[in-house]
Amino acid sequence: MAPRCPDWCVAPHGRYRGEEDWIHFGEPLRLTRDGIRAQLCLSVDPATGVHDGPHVLIGATEYSPVAAAALGRALTGLAELGLETPSPAAPPGSPDLPVSGP
């Protein structure tokens, strides 16, 4: 029996047996050009209904949603400080901010 999914789940349930089929995960968000991604995940034991998560995985590090939100606010604060600092024009070919997607 496939687990009931949160609205954000994109897992192909039914493809695996056992614990691997209990995991719900969202679309990955690419954070850096070298492959670091963030992804929401949650596991639910179908027999007991016990939840583990949700968690936000960033690379190999697991964060609670509260901790991930705090990290996002801290990064936004850093970016805002940077936007307030005059800087010379970026040289041609320098990397832009990463965008979501593969």
Image (cartoon, rainbow, N blue to C red):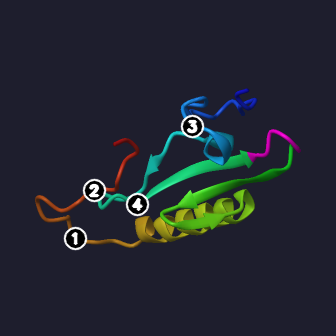
Q: Which residue is mark 1?
A: 88
Q: Nearer the viewer, mark 1 or mark 4?
A: 4
Rounded to the nearest whole Å, what is the CA distance between mark 4 and mark 2? Answer: 16 Å
Residue under the point 30% across and 61% down? 34
Q: Amino acid at mark 1?
A: Pro
Between 17 and 52, the residue placed more toward the observer is 17
Disc 3 element: loop
Q: Nearer the viewer, mark 4 or mark 2?
A: 4
Disc 2 element: loop
Furthest-right residue in this view = 48
Q: Nearer the viewer, mark 4 or mark 3?
A: 3
Disc 1 element: loop
Q: Amino acid at mark 4?
A: Ile
Please provide the residue range marked out in magenta: 44-48
Cβ–Cβ under 8 Å for marks 4 and 2: no
Task: Classify residue 61 by image quadrant.
Answer: bottom right
Rounded to the nearest whole Å, what is the CA distance between mark 4 and mark 3? Answer: 25 Å
Q: Which residue is mark 3?
A: 16
Quadrant for the N terminus in the image: top right
Task: Classify residue 47 by image quadrant.
Answer: top right
Residue under the point 67% across and 59% down? 69
Q: Is residue 72 above or below residue 15?
A: below
Residue under the point 59% across and 61% down? 72
Residue under the point 57% across and 59% down? 57
Residue 36 numbered mark, or none: 4
Residue 96 numbered mark, or none: 2
